[in-house]
Amino acid sequence: MRLRAKIRVFLLLATGVVGIWPLAAYAQEPAPVSEEIPELTPQQRRDSIRRAKLAGLAKSRGETVVYYDLYMQSGLPVFDTMQYPLDGFQKFDALYQHNDFRVDRGSLGMPDQLLEYMPRQVAGFGLRENPFSSWFYTLENTPFYQTKNPYTTLYFVNNFGKDLNFFRATHSQNVARGLNLDIDFRVYDVYGRYYNSRSNQYNVRFSGNYISRDARYRIVFGYIHNVVAVGENGGIKEDSLFTRNISTNRLKIPVYMTSASNRWRENKYFFKQSYHFYDTKKDSIPENNRSYGYITHSFEVEDMLLKYRDKTTADDGFYTDFFLDPTQSSEQNVMMKMTNRVFYSSSDMEYLPFGYRFKFAAGFKNEYIRWHDRMLRKDCVQWFPFAQVQVDFADRFVFDAYLDFGFGGYNNFDFSGRAMFKYLFRDDRERTLSKRDGIEVMLGVNRFEADWLYTWHFSNHFYWSNDFGKTTEAYLQVKFNYKGWWLRAKAGMLNDYVFMKKDGPVQADKEFWVVNAVAGKNLHIGRYVGLDNLLMLGYSSNEDYLHLPLFGLQESLYGIIPIKNIAQIQIGLEFVYNTRYYADAYNPATAGYYWQDEIKTGNFFFMNVFLNFQVKRANLFIKCLNVAEGLFKYNYIQTPHYPLVDRCVRFGVSWRFFD
């Protein structure tokens, strides 16, 4: 073994002890494999050569390729060439296309709530649902680049100085062959139309990735810093003052609290590395040689601070209980979570291997959690062994099964299991299994402890200490993808479901069903018309526990005007709608949403008009939000007591630099 390879193996094993516990016990002998090297068809060989060449390389001047790291991915990633379409540019600063429906509080950076039912996929500790998840940088939405020349993007949005400033800058650069480093910085400052409704947020992300020349070793790493501070006024006191448009000066509409605020800060440190054991005697291309599998190790540290402050009294009418101080409160939660994952896989679980019909992966996850508020401290250690099996039939049919199980700590005896069957429509070997066009059916069963927020909370306004039984969740999920058309539909049965009410969490005493489906397609009708579609259906069999709108849609219709080969213009209309239902209300003291059955919202069209420009490397937009204000009723409220934004005009520009 060459000295360089020996050094890489040593670094892989040495960094495995970064956590609290040594990982020597994780080492496993590779599974025995047949001595016969599978023969490749000419097409398979061409595909494997192309993938090997794509690994870690951007070929032409100005080219930037990108990928997102997947949970069970160990081998070479599949890069996508960076695209800069004008479609959807007016929906500024989409971290990536969410394709989801969220309850909005009107201003950027404010807490929101996902309306789609999402079953759990893996077991582990949960502090609480993050109400800022759609605005924060996360591991899942972190892009990893490889560039031929340095790549930079600047992005600015403003509302003519009235209520919004937004700036984002991204820079990515390969500092050595296969080694890329990048920085991403973003800041929001939204003044708010109502008293004490300002939100300020900034996000910083340093990340990088490295792929060795022989493609044996790969690592992704980074640091994420998210901070948000929002004014918490509790909403307007009388919705009728808004719906009847009695005062056009929104600052004169009374709100519940004038000095309350929430601050959420988190730091995340992470890396994930994998080493490919393969024989180099036959060929210089890794995939054309006998493989002995991968060993993968990931390490994450999450440091989180949640702080709520207010100076309020019972006269304000929002809170009636004061356990600590009748004139002011200051509460905070602090958490640190450290996670190690180590697993061996016979092949990359995200690829359909050439000639390998059976794949498996096995390992375990370790979590250390330290949490405290002003009254209680909690420390726990827990372990989650997991295994995955995948069988490929004729490169068209795939069966995949996953199971993990918890020992010790808060999540003792939790488990998550699922079995998936997928039929692939076409032979596109340069895409990962999750991205390949096809139809997928998944059955899953989960048993889990409610998030920690539901077990313990002590503040000036709320106190509870609960010992809920574990929730059991069984679900069926169907996904469909074909040439840009996509559908995801889910049906879940929940038993001992834990949810939040106005005075605190409760556990459902009956099992119930929840069903929802989301589908979409971005269409170009001919050369000059575009139509972006997103539809949602939802149903809950027991509305005493969960409310969902029956139907929702997001539509964008626009015309395309090309100007030779140097520019493009889009003129369009976008609108959002959902049926009327009892939307969850918002509680500032817990920074979360809770079930209510007093106020219905919805059944209105929120419409925007936009004009997009693209001139070479620059994209620009001008957008009028809520253009139909005053033509219909003033009922555009999604979250009770929090109206959406009034009519305003915004403009934005992004500029890309490749060298």
Image (cartoon, helix red, strand yellow):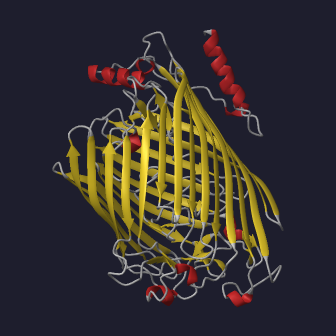
Which residue is nearer to you in this view: 203 or 269? Answer: 203
Which residue is nearer to you in this view: 424 or 627? Answer: 627
Q: Would residue 610 be found to the left or right of residue 338 on screen?
A: left
State the residue at coordinates (45%, 72%). Answer: 513
Which residue is nearer to you in this view: 320 or 478? Answer: 320
Residue 62 in picture, x, y percent from top left: 40, 28
Q: Total label count?
A: 0
Q: Would residue 97 be found to the left or right of residue 241 on screen?
A: left
State the residue at coordinates (52%, 67%). Answer: 107
Residue 491 versus residue 183 in the image, above or below? below
Question: Can the viewer see residue 62 in this picture?
Answer: yes
Which quarter of the image is occupied by the N terminus?
top right
Residue situated furthest front in the rendering? 161
Residue 339 in picture, x, y percent from top left: 68, 45
Residue 310, located in which quarter of the rendered image? bottom right
State the residue at coordinates (28%, 35%). Answer: 427
Residue situated furthest left in the rendering? 526
Residue 159 in picture, x, y percent from top left: 47, 61
Q: Would residue 68 be found to the left or right of residue 223 on screen?
A: left
Residue 55 versus residue 234 in the image, above or below? above
State the residue at coordinates (27%, 23%). Answer: 43
Residue 201 in picture, x, y percent from top left: 61, 57
